[in-house]
Amino acid sequence: MTEHTGPDQPLDGTQHVPAGSDDTSPEGGSDDTSPEGGQALLERRYRRLLYAYPVGYRSVRGDELVGTYLDLVDQERRWPSPHDAADVLRGGLRQRLRENGALGLVAGLPVAATIAVSTLAALAVFLLVQVELVPDDVLAGRIGPPQTLGAFVWVGWLLAALATATLPARWARRAVGTAIGLTLAVIPASPLTGLGRPPLYVLLPVLAFGLTALALPARPGWGGRVPPVLGVLAGTAAAVLFEVAEGSGNWFTAYYSTVEVLGMAAPVLLGLVLVFGLGRAVTGDNSALWSAVLLLTPASLLGLRPIAEEYFDSATTWAQLAATAAVLTLLGAAVLLAVVGWHGARHRAVRARSAGGPCPTCGHVADVAERAGSTARRAMP
């Protein structure tokens, strides 16, 4: 493979840039508009992207990675392509997780995405039946026209769930992206059309689940196609149970009266995911447990209004709701980082214990340790 390092290139794969220089300044007297100068400029920019990788990995394979990208790009290019930049960042994140023994997080993303789509399907059916299609001034059981623009949002998520259950992954992701667009579109569309919309404390968790759903598995099997159908059935069953419990009343036919229902759905969802994850962990698959950590923030946002009212008052302002949403998001991120950090410490401790002896799991002895032991035994009298 062609090396693309200069004579003063340090061993750690980084490029020495003189003080006061920038990407547009000549280096070594070469002009950046020339092919040679443009290639050097592009190389420096690729090397900066490599900071996404850990230092040790970058020092060993940095030249190889940069050389591979430079061999594949157009000679006239001056900036890494968005695809290459995303590929470097994705590879760097994966390597950092690998070094921390937390690759289960990557495996948990498709599981979390499937659960997110299933949850949105259940919410869409429930809110479409209980709120949108039942006018507030009549008894439940009468079907009326949609009450707000939210009907388009819930139909969009039902179609996304149907696409996830039946279509290839790329079309399912497009359907999820379209549903996210509809969810965002109702916010400016409401004042423009004069029609109502679901409140933001309902739309915000929907967006959080929707963004999680973009990580749908590339090759879904039955485990990726059945849960959205189950979500639709669960939402329908919940709507029927509420209809029976209301006794032909008119209790949960507005978004403000379903706040407690959404708040109760959060612990139920996390509890089911944890039970499912523990069952999978018995067989050595901890991806579902990682999905519970990933779903912590979207699930907690389902209780955004009750949590804000608990710490403020019943007449919470939008600023208080925004502050509560920010705190819940930061707490979810902190829990995720703490779990990754714990896995990293545990992984490094296991590697340190097994560095000079057999692996505690399989009994394998590393070649370096085995040679060192053989040398020591020969040196003994």
Image (cartoon, grey):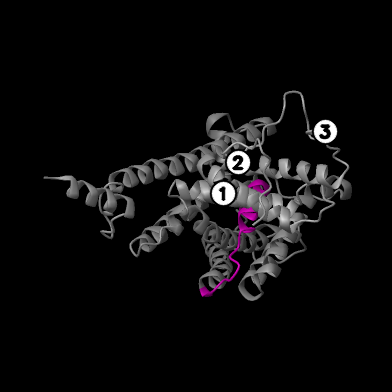
Q: CA distance from mark 1 to mark 3?
A: 28 Å
Report the number of numbered marks: 3
Q: Residue furthest left?
A: 381
Which numbered disc covers residue 61?
Answer: 1
Q: Quadrant of the N terminus?
A: bottom right
User: Which residue is depicted at the point 27% across and 48% down?
Assistant: 372
Q: Main secondary structure of the magenta part?
A: helix
| 211 drawn magenta | yes
The magenta segment? 202-222
Q: Secondary structure at mark 2?
A: loop
Q: Mark 2–mark 1 contact, CB under 8 Å? A: yes
Vertically, is 196 above or below 166? above
Cα gap from disc 2 to disc 1, whole angstroms? 8 Å
Q: Which residue is mark 3?
A: 29
Which element type, helix, strand or loop, lies under badge 3? loop
State the mark number for residue 13: 2
Q: Is 285 situated left or right of 77 in this image?
A: left
**Which mark lies nearer to you, 1 or 3?**
3
Q: What amino acid is at disc 2?
A: Gly
Q: Is residue 183 visible?
A: no
**To which quarter of the image does residue 191 belong?**
top right
Closer-to-camera residue (10/177): 10
Residue type of the residue flagged with mark 3: Gly
Which is more N-terminal, label 1 or label 2? Answer: 2
Question: Tag 3 or tag 1, which sits nearer the N-term?
Answer: 3
In this rendering, the answer to whether 30 lies above or below 236 is: above
Against 326, is 204 above or below? Answer: below
Q: Type of residue at label 1?
A: Arg
